[in-house]
Amino acid sequence: MGKGRLEAFSDGVIAIIITIMVLELKVPHHADIEGLTPLIPVFVSYALSFIYVGIYWNNHHHMLHATKSINGAIMWANLHLLFWLSLIPFVTGWMGENHFAKWPVICYGIVLIMNSIAYTILVKLLIRHHGEHSLLGTAFGSDTKGKISMAIYAVAIVVSFIQSWLGFALYIVVACIWFIPDRRIENKMNKEEEPYHG
Amino acid sequence: MGKGRLEAFSDGVIAIIITIMVLELKVPHHADIEGLTPLIPVFVSYALSFIYVGIYWNNHHHMLHATKSINGAIMWANLHLLFWLSLIPFVTGWMGENHFAKWPVICYGIVLIMNSIAYTILVKLLIRHHGEHSLLGTAFGSDTKGKISMAIYAVAIVVSFIQSWLGFALYIVVACIWFIPDRRIENKMNKEEEPYHG
Amino acid sequence: MGKGRLEAFSDGVIAIIITIMVLELKVPHHADIEGLTPLIPVFVSYALSFIYVGIYWNNHHHMLHATKSINGAIMWANLHLLFWLSLIPFVTGWMGENHFAKWPVICYGIVLIMNSIAYTILVKLLIRHHGEHSLLGTAFGSDTKGKISMAIYAVAIVVSFIQSWLGFALYIVVACIWFIPDRRIENKMNKEEEPYHG
Amino acid sequence: MGKGRLEAFSDGVIAIIITIMVLELKVPHHADIEGLTPLIPVFVSYALSFIYVGIYWNNHHHMLHATKSINGAIMWANLHLLFWLSLIPFVTGWMGENHFAKWPVICYGIVLIMNSIAYTILVKLLIRHHGEHSLLGTAFGSDTKGKISMAIYAVAIVVSFIQSWLGFALYIVVACIWFIPDRRIENKMNKEEEPYHG
C-alpha cells in the first residue's frame, strides 16, 4: 500500500491545524495599540504551538521519507496522532487567553504527552512493518530524545500545580530540544546512500 | 481521465472537515478545570465523528487505490459524498452541545445514512465503470457490511425517539464494525499481485 | 513552467471554500427540531453554492487536464478566479440568512457573473498560450454555454429587483445547465487519443 | 532530501491563509444594501492581502521550482515564513475593521516587513545550499526589488504615524511592483534550457 495519500492527507490536516490556531488571535474592535496588550499571551502561546506543530510535521516528514510502504494499522496510528495534534489549537487558545494559568498549562502538557505517545506508537508500528534492522529501526534506536521529552512533560505538569509559568518554561525547553530536525534518520540515510564516504 | 486530482481534492476536503470539527470545542473563558466539564459531551461527540470521517477517508483511499480511471458521473458521485460528509461537523456540534438529546442524535443518524447511501452510489458507479469482474467488483461483492451498517443506523434512529443514548451507542457499534479498514480490497489486491503465493 | 503546483494550490483553495461555507450553518443552541427551521434557507443556499463550486472545480479540472504548460499571466488569472470564488461563501451566507431577499440575491448574482468573467479570462489566456488550434482552443469554440449563463445571470439580477425568488430560481437553472461536466474537452481528447475510432 | 512535501505543505498553509481571510467579511444580519457599506474597507483590505499572499505564493512557486534539494535549516526557514504569512489575516481584519487607522496600518507594515525578512532568509539559505553560481544564486543577484520593498515598507510605517492612508497607499505601490511574477528566475531558466537560442 503506497504512502503517497497518507502523506498528502497528513500534510493537509497539519496545515489546517497550524493555520486555524491563528483564529484564536481575535481581531480587536478598537484601533488603539493598547488593544493588542491582552493578545500578547495568546500570541506567545500561538508561537510556541506553531513551533510544536512544525516539529511534528518536520519529524513526520523525515519518518515517512524513510518509509517504504504502510498498512491499515499504520493508517489508524497516523489518524490517532492527527487526533491529538488537532487538540493543540484548543489548549493553545485556552492557555493563551488565561495567561498561562494552572489548569490550561496542565492540559497543554497532557495533550503534548498524548501526542508524544501517539507518535511513538506510529514509529513502533512502522518499525515492526519494516523490520528492526531497517533504516527506520536502526535510526530510532532507543529513542532517548523521545523519552527525555516525555519525562520533562511529566515534570512540567507536576510543577504547574505549584507554579504554572515554570511548567510553560519547560515546554519551551522541550521545543528547543526538538527544534533541530531529527538528524538520526538523515544521517543514517546519507551513510547508506554514500557507503564509501563514511 | 486520471484519478489524481480527484484524490487530492477529496483529501483536501476531508482533511478540512475532520479539522474544523474541533472548532466546536469552544475555548472556555475561565481557567478552572470545571470549565471543561460542559465540553465533555462535545469532546466525545468530536472523537466519534473523527473516527467516522477517518473510516470514510480510509475506505475512500482503499477504493480509489483499486480504481484505474474515472468519469464525469463518478466525479459528481464523489462530490455528493463530500457534501454529506461536510454536514458531519454540524450534527456533531449540535449533538455534543445538547448532550445527546433526541433530535440531534436522530439527525446525526440521518446524516450517517445519507453518507452511507452516497458512498454506495460512488462504489456502484466505480464498479459499473470498471466492470463487474474487476478487482473492485469482486472485492465489494454483496456489500454485507454496508447493508448491516444502514440497518443499524435505521434502528438507532427509531430507538432514539425513545432513548437517545441507546441510539448514540449504536453509532459507536457501527464505528467499531468499520474500524478495521476494508480488507476486502486489500486481500483481493494481494492475491492478484502475488498469484503464486495464494 | 509546470502546472502541477497550480493545480495543487487551486485544489486546496477550492476545497477550503467549499468546506468553510458549512460554517454558516450555525449550530442551534437548543435540541428541538424547530431549531432547524430557520436553517432551511441557509441549507438550501449552501447546497446550491456547493454545486456551483463543484461545477467550477470540475471544469477547472477538465481545463487544466488539457493544459500542457502555464505562464505568469495564467497564474494571476487563476488567482483572480480564486478571489471571486472565495466570495461565494459570503454571499451564500448572506442570501441564506435573509431568506433570499432582494439585495443578497442580486449580490449573489454579481459574484457569479464575476466568477464567470474570471473563468473566461483564464480560458482565453490558456488558449492564447496553447494556440487557437490546440485541443483547448477547438474544444471551447464560441463558448455558447458560458455566454448563455452570463445572459441568465444578468436577467436574474434584473428580475430580482422585482421578485428575488425568481432570480434565485434562475441561478438553479444555470447550475442545471452546467451540472454535466464540460464534455467538449473530454470528447475532443478521446477523439485525438483514438484517431482511428472516430 | 526532496522538496515535494515542502511544496505541498506550503501550498496547503498558503491556501488556508488566503481563504480564511474572507471569514473577516462577516455576513450582515440584515438584507439592506446599506449593510454592506461598513464592509467596504474590510473588502479593500482583504483584496490587498489576497494580492500580497498571491505574490508570495507566486514567488515561492518560482523559487522552489529552481530548487533541487533542501535541508533541515531550509525547512525551518520556510516554516518561519509561513508563520509571518499566517499573521496577515489578523492584521488585515484589524486594518479593515478600523478603516485604515494609524496602529492597524503600522502593524500591517510590520508584518509585511517580517514576511520580507523571512523570505530573504529563505532565499539566502537556498542559495547557500545550491551555491552562489547556481541558477538561484545568479537569478537573485543583489535583490534590488526586495530592498526597495523593504525601504518603502519602512517609509510607509513612519508616514502612517502622521497620515495612515498614505501608508496604506504605499503598500499598494509595493504590491504593484511585485504583481509581475519574479521573471528573474524564469528568464534565467529559459536561457539555461535553450542555450543556443540566446
Image (tube, coloured by chain):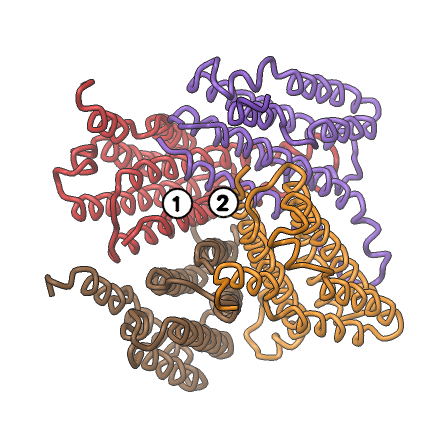
Chain colours: A orange, B purple, C red, D brown
Task: Give the CA separation, mark 1 to mark 2.
Answer: 9 Å
Left or right for C38, reference B168: left
Q: Are marks 1 and 2 in contact (CB under 8 Å)?
A: yes
Report in which chain the residue with disc 2 lies.
C
Task: Indicate whether A89 appears above or below D148.
Answer: above
Label placed on residue C107? 1
Please give the name of the residue rendered at 44% of the width and 76% of the height, measured from the top-left corner.
D121
Q: How many marks?
A: 2
Quadrant placement of the C terminus of chain C: top left
**Residue type, numbered disc 1:** Cys
Residue tagged 2: C94
- The tag earlier along the polypeptide, 1 or 2, is 2
Report in which chain the residue with disc 1 lies.
C
Q: Is residue B121 visible?
A: yes
Please give the name of the residue rendered at 60% of the width and 35% of the height, measured from the top-left corner.
B58
**Residue type, numbered disc 2:** Trp
